């Protein structure tokens, strides 16, 4: 029997994952509750000692040493205690006065069993909770065990956690047996039912931990999440910055073709996430925070934390967002009270208010850089002052030069015009019109005849285009030296610019174009007048 007790004790400790000392203390407390049910021990303080080796149970009646005895069932005088039990007994000590026989009944045994199970559950819960202590803020994968009106019980392996209704996303649908990732928010040790694990699905830290899991650059520290503004289930804005050169913070979070961000969106069941780059300049930071709307200007107040963003009128509703969501998230993300106005309500021609540089910007600029900036601005102003009279003098000098060239250009134009007329007459003589007049055949054409006529027209047009396209290349080189034909001496500066050559080419080509168009129209009229050939 004694060996059976040891085997049962060891097996129970192994099944519960508890040390043997915890199981022994739970059994002793259970036996105390069982013996108190007996009429012999009613009104007395008793203690139970269990020998783990032999399994023997010893029940003692405990009394407190006092000067004057008021309750003889629980108290004993100093003189009696020193005489009968302990010579060194003093006031306030507890003494085991007598042993009770191990005579527990069926009811006492049932009570002991219930107390043992309860104590074992409490001990098991304390050990499990000790494992989660210090893990607040971590993501844990849990399974929904049961759904209650005010909370959801989730199973996290060895422990159960509570998802309160205040930490649930209203747009999400929870089903029993489904798995989801939750954030361990706190351990409630003051609960009436004992310590409880509280998890959340709405915490902003959950979004940050998901980014750390999906983006290696954030986990390694190359990219830092500066601020997060979230309205769970609807939309979130995340401001990131690179702490390592050559790293794109926004691109790292989005991933190739949006793979990284898409996995986070799927985990949050379709919540929209805006990723933007953080900037130490408040103007730039607020403009990024109001994305996807366009911002013309941001006016920062120097006396308060107010900022006014001026956006195009067509982007006003986009900047404010649905029910003011975009503006609300931007204000929460940046820490500024953002007022959004349309460009129609604000005069954009006025200069924006000058904002004093922040402490971060002042520290980032060294004395050498400030001196360089001041020197550059002085040199720029000096060059503007010097360049104004120079431009005026150049304008005065060029005016008479242009007037002198005006008369010479008129003579050049007359010579060119005469040469072009002569060339045009020569071309007419070399290429006489070969059009022959044919009698007009009256009568309507059939569908086949019209089709054949259209095909012939297209073929003739292609041939004419090829012929006229080569005319310009066949022009002799003497045409470009026409100014020598009109006068025996060389005209200095007759063709001075590329524009003159282009005008010359354009004049010849335009005349040839008019000639070719006249010839093509004549050919078309001749073909219409020819009798149509019938297909055999």
Image (cartoon, helix red, strand yellow):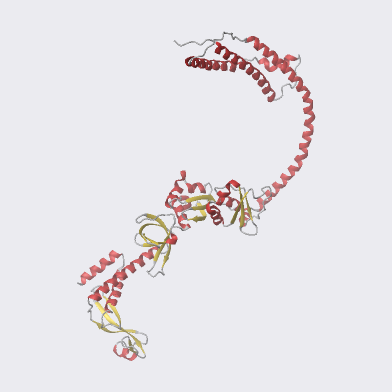
Q: Is residue 132 above or below residue 507?
A: below
Q: Residue at x 47, y 15 (%)?
A: 448
Evaluate whether residue 298 shows in this view. Answer: yes
Q: Is residue 191 above or below residue 434?
A: below
**Residue 280 relative to residue 256: left or right:** right
Report the front residue among 311 and 228.
311
Q: How many marks?
A: 0
Which quadrant would the N terminus be assigned to in this image? bottom left
Question: From the image, which quarter does the C terminus lie in?
Answer: top left
Q: Position of residue 28 (x, y in %)?
A: 29, 75
Image position of 300 with respect to 400: above or below:
below
* Residue 485 horizontal/vertical position (percent): 72, 14
Looking at this view, is 153 or 251 the one in front?
Answer: 153
Query: Is there any visible trace of residue 136 in the rendered image?
Result: no
- Between residue 192 and residue 35, name the one nearer to us: 192
Residue found at x 68% / y 12%: 425
Q: Is residue 491 left or right of residue 210?
A: right
Q: Is residue 309 above or below residue 197?
A: above
Residue 236 percent coordinates (x, y): 50, 53
Toward the front, the furthest residue is 443
Residue at image location 27% in from the left, 78% down from the top: 35
Query: Is residue 5 found left or right of 225 in the rendered image?
Result: left
Q: Quadrant of the rendered structure where residue 168 is?
A: bottom left
Tell me where residue 149 appears, x and y as whole percent: 39, 62
């Amino acid at each position: 029997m004694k060996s059976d007790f040891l085997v049962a004790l060891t097996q129970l400790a192994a099944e519960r994952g508890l040390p043997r000392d915890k199981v022994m203390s739970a059994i002793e407390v259970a036996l105390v509750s069982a013996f108190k049910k007996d009429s012999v021990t009613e009104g007395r303080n008793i203690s139970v000692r269990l020998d783990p080796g032999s399994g023997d149970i010893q029940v003692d009646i405990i009394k407190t040493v006092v000067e004057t005895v008021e309750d003889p069932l629980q108290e004993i005088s100093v003189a009696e205690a020193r005489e009968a039990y302990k010579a060194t007994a003093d006031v306030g000590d507890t003494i085991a006065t007598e042993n009770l026989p191990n005579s527990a009944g069926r009811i006492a045994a049932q009570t002991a069993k219930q107390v043992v199970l309860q104590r074992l559950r409490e001990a098991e819960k304390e050990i499990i909770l000790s494992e989660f202590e210090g893990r607040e803020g971590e993501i844990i994968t849990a399974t929904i065990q049961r759904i209650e009106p005010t909370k959801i019980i989730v199973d996290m392996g060895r422990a159960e956690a509570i998802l309160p209704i205040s930490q649930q996303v209203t747009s999400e649908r929870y089903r029993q047996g489904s798995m989801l990732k939750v954030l361990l928010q706190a351990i409630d040790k003051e609960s009436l039912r004992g310590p409880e694990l509280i998890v959340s699905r709405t915490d902003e830290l959950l979004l940050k931990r998901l980014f750390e899991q999906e983006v290696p650059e954030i986990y390694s520290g190359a990219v830092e999440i500066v601020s997060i503004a979230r309205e769970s289930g609807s939309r979130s804005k995340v401001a990131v910055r690179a702490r390592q050169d050559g790293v794109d913070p926004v691109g790292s979070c989005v991933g190739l073709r949006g793979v990284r961000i898409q996995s986070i969106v799927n985990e949050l069941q379709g919540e929209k996430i805006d990723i933007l780059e953080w900037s130490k300049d408040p103007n730039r930071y607020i403009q990024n925070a109001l994305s996807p709307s366009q911002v013309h200007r941001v006016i920062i107040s120097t006396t308060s934390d107010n900022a006014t963003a001026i956006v195009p009128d067509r982007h006003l509703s986009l900047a404010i967002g649905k029910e003011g969501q975009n503006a609300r998230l931007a204000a929460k993300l940046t820490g500024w009270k953002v007022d959004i106005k349309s460009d129609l309500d604000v005069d954009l021609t006025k200069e924006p208010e000058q904002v004093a540089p922040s402490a971060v910007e002042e520290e980032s600029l060294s004395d050498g850089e400030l001196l360089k900036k001041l020197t550059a601005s002085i040199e720029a102003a000096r060059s503007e002052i010097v360049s104004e009279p120079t431009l005026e003098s150049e304008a005065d000098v060029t005016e008479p030069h242009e007037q002198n060239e005006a008369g010479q250009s008129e003579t050049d134009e007359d010579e060119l015009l005469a040469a072009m007329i002569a060339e045009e007459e020569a071309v007419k003589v070399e290429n006489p019109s070969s059009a022959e007049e044919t009698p007009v055949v009256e009568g309507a054409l059939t569908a086949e005849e019209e089709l054949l006529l259209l095909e012939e027209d297209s073929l003739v047009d292609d041939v004419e285009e090829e012929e006229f396209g080569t005319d310009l290349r066949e022009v002799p080189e003497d045409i470009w030296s026409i100014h020598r034909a009109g006068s025996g001496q060389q005209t200095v500066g007759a063709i001075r610019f590329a524009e003159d050559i282009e005008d010359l080419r354009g004049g010849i080509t335009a005349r040839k174009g008019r000639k070719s168009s006249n010839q093509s129209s004549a050919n078309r009229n001749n073909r219409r007048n020819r009798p149509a050939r019938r297909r055999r």
